[in-house]
Amino acid sequence: MNSTFRAKTDEQRFLEGPGTRKSELGFIFRIVFDLFRGIRCLHSVGPCVTVFGSARTEEDHPYYALGRRVGSSLAEIGFTVMTGGGPGIMEAANRGAKEAGGRSVGCNVTLAREQEPNPYLDRWTTIHYFFLRKVFLFKYSYAFVALPGGAGTMDELFEAITLIQTKKIGSFPIVLMGVDYWEPLVEFMKEMVEEGTISESDLHLFLVTDSVKEAIAHIDRHAVKKYRLIAKSE
């Protein structure tokens, strides 16, 4: 049996419902092992900002350059930049942080087509399940920046909004970079307000901007100053 097929059946076994007691016990041990390893790896990384974005964005794309500027600017105000650890915009943000002399960490996830950690990480952990990956992306972060991305980015963005909306985490700032890209989503959310499925106040949980300077000022005001954060030394 090849490794790709094994990786697929691992995920299928989790999603298909109850298995044997032995397989369920193995699933529990896998979760505990990933949690232990992730906490051991990341507990001392300092206050983080998690950057979400597409793994498919090429290095010559303007969004890659934007992610790189975001990463460097976050590092310059003392944050560790955390991403999903993969290529594309995740790589760009980690690269920007590294180039600015800041700290750069990632939460990589195993996929059927193996996702390798990008080369700009000071530290990373590799996780088997997406839901555990999100635990770490949110556990250590005081702000979230979403650049253009696909289904995974939307999942992470709405997880952040939901956690803040339901007060499961603090009222941390969320910034959506790329006005043109996010405008249709914002318009749809306004329709959700009209339908009564979300509150109008939920539209104020995030800032939409093209300006890195405005994004950093927003994070500085609503994270650094609000929570009296101090950059962690090595």
Image (cartoon, rainbow, N blue to C red):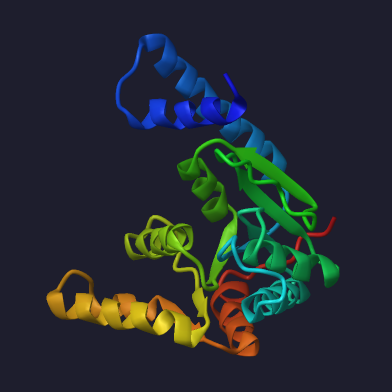
Rendered position, 25 above or below 96: above
Count of residue discs: 0
**Rendered image quadrant of residue 102:** bottom right
Rendered position, 27 above or below 155: above
Name, please, the residue furthest toward the left.
Answer: 195
Q: Quadrant of the N terminus?
A: top right
Q: Quadrant of the C terminus?
A: bottom right
**Rendered image quadrant of residue 83:** bottom right
Please state if 188 lies on the left or on the right of 179 as rendered: left
Please state if 14 lies on the left or on the right of 142 as rendered: left
* Image x and y of residue 95, in percent: 77, 66
Rendered position, 78 above or below 12: below
* Image x and y of residue 119, in percent: 79, 54
Front residue (pair 187, 135) = 187
**Rendered image quadrant of residue 221:** bottom right
Identify the residue at image location x=52%, y=83%: 178
* Image x and y of residue 29, in percent: 52, 21
Identify the residue at image location x=65%, y=88%: 213
Front residue (pair 40, 90) = 90
* Image x and y of residue 201, in percent: 29, 79
Identify the residue at image location x=49%, y=44%: 130
